[in-house]
Amino acid sequence: MNNKSMLNKIEERARSVIAVVFAVTTIIMPFALSGTTQAAQITSRKVTLGSSAASASTTYTLSTAALPTATAVQSLELVACTTASGACSTPAGFTSVGSSTTGVTTGLGTNTGWTNNTATAGKLRITQTNAVAPSGVVSVPWTAVTNPSTTNTTFYLRMTTYSDTAWTNALDTGVIAVSTANAITVTASVDESLTFCTGTSGITSSSCASATGSSVSLGTLTPSTSGTGTSQIGVTTNASTGYVITYNGILPTSGGNTIASIGAAATSPTQGTSQFGMNMVANTVPSSFGANPAGAGSANPVTALNTTNQYSFTAGAATNAVSQGSADGFRLFTVSYLANVSGTQAPGTYTTVLTYVCTATF
């Protein structure tokens, strides 16, 4: 075979190989350009639990950004799994049986008419024959979902939207991690308390800290000159049914002589008459002295001691001065004492010791 013949055969084989290559390329290209549609990833997805306590029956609220699909969504599900991917095992104790949707479902197109489905315990599902394309932020609330029974454990809610009402034709997907957690119990105790003090000065409308004094002088009494003076009481308690303050003492006495009681009921004073009494308010007769109750509390004196310029005194027995029926903030009481004498009142130094007792009922 001459050289020319050999060259001709090589060219024929080359053309044949090139033809095969082009033929193969022609067959392969259509497959390279075709493909299958993939479900889009849902973004900004989260599920907010009303409680993270294990086995709690609580609310689950799904929230996501606007869905990537323009196809109408007719069903949606959250599948509870122990892993984010692969075969799904329902977390122990998790169940959607008994759950329901509450409030407004948004972002899925039509916002009303969505039906909750509890046929599968491990799935939160809703469905609606919706024909409106999704738009805006998605929100789907469920109630009475039971958390997994193991505390401090992460589980996953695999979310999928579908174009049909049977959870078959998937549109968009996403996975959401959530977790149970220990509920922290914080305890504190409040002891029964009563703050009570008496004195002649230093007690403020909020504190007994500076209480001082135990003697009240009414001065020198004459038929035309009344004697007046004051002492203080401070009190607060957390007793549920409040407190009672009583006073107990005899009439002012000098040897065998006494200054008479003004009476058990509130009475206006009369100079020139032997009388001893008190009240717990501000007065202008026979002069300006005393003060009304003050402080954060609401307690007030009993009626007989709560009228301006009227006085009362009961000797020889514990007599209520204040009766408060519930726990009360700090209260400052000013006790105003009054004494008058007649022209025949025997001379002497007249003294009485009054004891105040506060009884709180818890």
Image (cartoon, grey):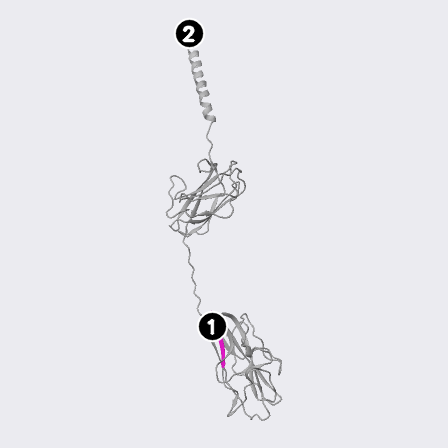
**Label annotation for residue 194:** 1
Image quadrant containing the N terminus: top left
Looking at the rendered structure, the kind of residue marked 2 is Ser
Q: Is residue 336 visible?
A: no
| Percent x, y of residue 91 | 38, 46
**Label annotation for residue 239:** none
Image quadrant containing the C terminus: bottom left
Dominant secondary-structure state across the stretch colored magenta = strand
Q: Residue at x 42, y 13 (%)?
A: 13
Label 1: which secondary element: strand
For label 2, the residue is 5
Count the numbered circles shown: 2
Looking at the rendered structure, the kind of residue marked 1 is Leu
Q: Is residue 198 visible?
A: yes
Magenta stretch encompasses residue 242: yes
Q: Which residues are magenta?
A: 240-247
Closer mark to the observer between disc 2 and disc 1: 1
**Left or right: 83 as drawn, with respect to 298:** left
Which of 93 and 156 lies nearest the eye of the viewer? 93
Q: How busy is the neighbourhood of tag 2: few (under 14 within 10 Å), some, or many (20 plus)?
A: few
Q: How busy is the neighbourhood of tag 1: few (under 14 within 10 Å), some, or many (20 plus)?
A: some
